[in-house]
Image: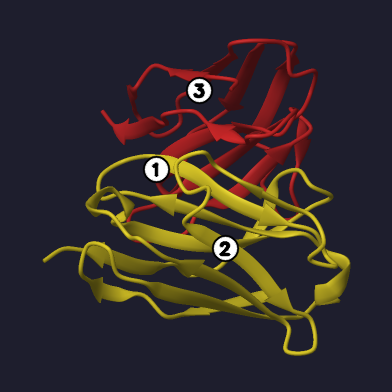
Amino acid sequence: EVQLLQSGGGLVQPGGSLRLSCEASGFTFSSYAMGWVRQAPGKGLEWVSSLSGSGGSTYYADSVKGRFTISRDNSKNTLYLQMNSLRAEDTAVYYCGKVAQWTYFDYWGQGTLVTVSS
Amino acid sequence: EIVMTQSPATLSASPGERATLSCRASQSISSNLAWYQQKPGQAPRLLIYGASTRATGIPARFSGSGSGTEFTLTISSLQSEDFAVYYCQHYNIWPLTFGGGTKVEIK
């Protein structure tokens, strides 16, 4: 059974940093692309970033490019999202997801809330 | 960036009724479209990929159709557990984008 267990998140001041983690199990982690999607309170879904199984290819939404870094540690079956220079508009529930062949998200984590506020 | 537009924003229907949700892409995306269901407080769940292929474990009452720029998700007979928000997402090119969602509510 595929499971994605997220950790990290919380309250951070504008301009601050936070790292999200997503530990995977139930599949061969290194064989699949992974990604992050966020959802602002009461709003729809927004794709944030994706990376390949090896970690060698990464893609970012323009809204986070240059501030967020996606990475993975295949020895730990864990995906990360390093978020720097956080803004109020980054406040959202962040979901990690397993990506089927650079396409859709076939499995999702439980989500973690990031609140950027002073 | 490809803009995904969903309609209607809210669909009111009764259990047992047929529901038809639409998703339009601002340019052709072939069949590179997925549909998700999201219930309050939960993560999204994949329903359909490739515009018309049901994901594992998805009931047959859910069906997807369309290609190019016009897509439809049909729920043939609404069950109580189907009242939720539905999102479409294209994966034709970067960046990936989602539609704004359609809320299916009980009439």
Dot 1, crowdedness within 10 Å: few (<14), some or many (≥20)?
some
Q: Which of marks 2 and 3 is in front?
A: 2
Q: According to the rendering, which colour does chain A have?
A: yellow
Q: Do the residues labelled 1 and 3 touch (CB within 8 Å)?
A: no
Residue sticking out furthest to the bottom: A76
Q: What residue type is labelled 2?
A: Thr
Q: Same chain for marks 2 and 3?
A: no
Q: Is residue A43 depicted above or below A36 in this figure?
A: above
Which residue was labeled with disc 2? A69
Residue B69 image offset from top left, x and y in percent = 67, 10
**Rendered residue at 20%/69% (across/down):** A13
Q: Which of B18 and B95 is in front in this view?
A: B95
Q: Which chain carries label 3?
A: B
Residue identified by numbered label 3: B18
Residue B16, compared with residue B18, is above or below; it is below
Residue B9: where, in percent of width, then height?
Answer: 34, 22
Residue A62 location, x and y as percent? Answer: 51, 38
Q: Residue at x 74, y 11 (%)?
A: B68
Q: Name the residue under label 1.
A: B84
**Rendered shade, chain B:** red
Which residue occupies the foreground of this view, A70 or B74? Answer: A70
* Residues beneath discs 1 and 3 located on the same chain: yes
Q: In this view, does A35 lie to the left or right of A68?
A: right
Foreground residue among A47 and A109: A47
3D distance between C-alphas at marks 2 and 3: 43 Å
SS at circle 1: loop
Q: What residue type is labelled 1?
A: Ala
Q: In this view, does B104 lie to the left or right of B54?
A: left
